[in-house]
Structure formats: C-alpha cells, structure tokens
Amino acid sequence: MIQLENRFIDVFGTIPIITYKGGNLVSKYDFGTEHDCLRFLSVNTRPIDKYPLIWLDTTELVLKGKPSRLQSRLKFILAYPTTSELENRERLKESFEKILDILFNNVIIALQQCGFITFKNSSNNQFARRFNYSETNDAESGFPDIWDAIVFSRDVEISDCDTKQINY
C-alpha cells in the first residue's frame, strides 16, 4: 500500500527557503485532521517551528483503486501567522504575495514533478485565500494562532513510482 503522507515528508522537505524581512522561512509539512493540527500548533509554540505550514487535511482523505495506482482528492492548507489588526490589502501584500503565493507555487511544482502524483479532472480544482483564517486565537476557537491561508484541493492519481528530483 502506498504511504502517501510519508512520501510527502521527503517531497515537501525539498521546498526552497523563502526569504522574508531579512530572515529565512523554512516550510513545515504535517498532516492529519483539524484536531491533529491543533495539537501540532499547541506542541510547537515557537512560530519558527511551525510556519509557514503545509498541512495535508486527512479528514476526508480516501484512497480508491488498485494498491499500485490510487485515486483521491487532496486538500492542503498553507498557513502563515498574522495579526487581527492588519487590513486585507496589507495581508495581500505581506502574507500572500511575499510568502503564501510563493509557497503555493512551490507546492504545486513539487506535486507535479515528484513522479508519483498526477493531477486529474482540473475542472474540479478548488482554491481559496482565507484572511484571518481562524478569526480568533482564543480558547473557544481552539486555534492558538491567527492565520492567513491558502486552501486548495485537487483530484489526483497516486502511483507507487519512485520519487523524482524536483526542480524549482
């Protein structure tokens, strides 16, 4: 059986560093349900240990087909912390243009070039920018941070082919 989540550890480990405000942002990949995400965010308390985040949402992840060639719908959340005081125009310039859009493009490149993912049914693609994604960072919401995020989903075919070198 194909261990998709495990294979993505290697693939997303190749994502290039993003330079932002004189520092280097190294993306973090993890996966699971919303509960798993909350636990990941709570355990990793320093922003440098968790952002920018590439999260594979496995809540509705179903793999169908032959063991060597599976079909599924992948949903990713790309997130970066923000503050509630920023206006959306500022978020577009700072969070999205300088970090999340770059990360999104690199994730798409990684998926297209990794050798074991093929995009299918492009008319079913979904993409959304989420400003203030978690709205609040209080005990009621469960989220310890406020995010700007890109949420996207793709129908894919997953094979047991070897992972290929990715050129960004």
Image: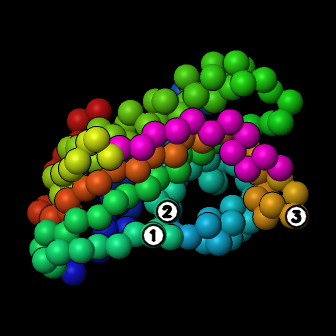
Q: Secondary structure at mark 2?
A: strand
Q: Which mark identifies residue 57?
A: 2
Mark 2 crowd level (few <14, some 14–19, many ≥20, 10 Å Cα): many
Q: Which mark is residue 139?
A: 3
Q: Which residues are magenta?
A: 125-136
Q: Which residue is found at the position 19% from the left and 69% from the top?
A: 70
> For the residue marked with disc 3, what is the amino acid?
Ala
Spatial CA span between label 1 and label 3: 25 Å
- Residue type beneath disc 1: Glu
Colour basis: rainbow
The residue located at (58%, 28%) in the rendering is: 96
Relative to 161, does residue 2 appear above or below in the rendering? below
> Where is the N terminus found, in terms of image quarters?
bottom left
Q: Quadrant of residue 25?
A: top right
x then y, percent, for residue 104: 44, 37
Identify whether 125 is placed above or below 10: above
Q: Are marks 2 and 1 in contact (CB under 8 Å)?
A: yes
Residue nearest the observer in this picture, 168 or 104: 104
In the rendered image, residue 132 lying in the magenta stretch gets the answer yes
Task: Give the label, 1 or 3, closer to the camera.
Answer: 1
The picture quadrant where one finds residue 83 is: top right
The numbered mark, 1 or 3, whose residue comes first in the sequence reads: 1
Residue 22, by quadrant, is: top right
Q: Report whether residue 28 is seen.
A: yes
Name the amino acid type tagged 2.
Asp
Q: Is residue 126 left or right of residue 88?
A: left
Which residue was labeled with disc 1?
60
| Sooner in the amino-acid sequence: mark 3 or mark 2 | 2
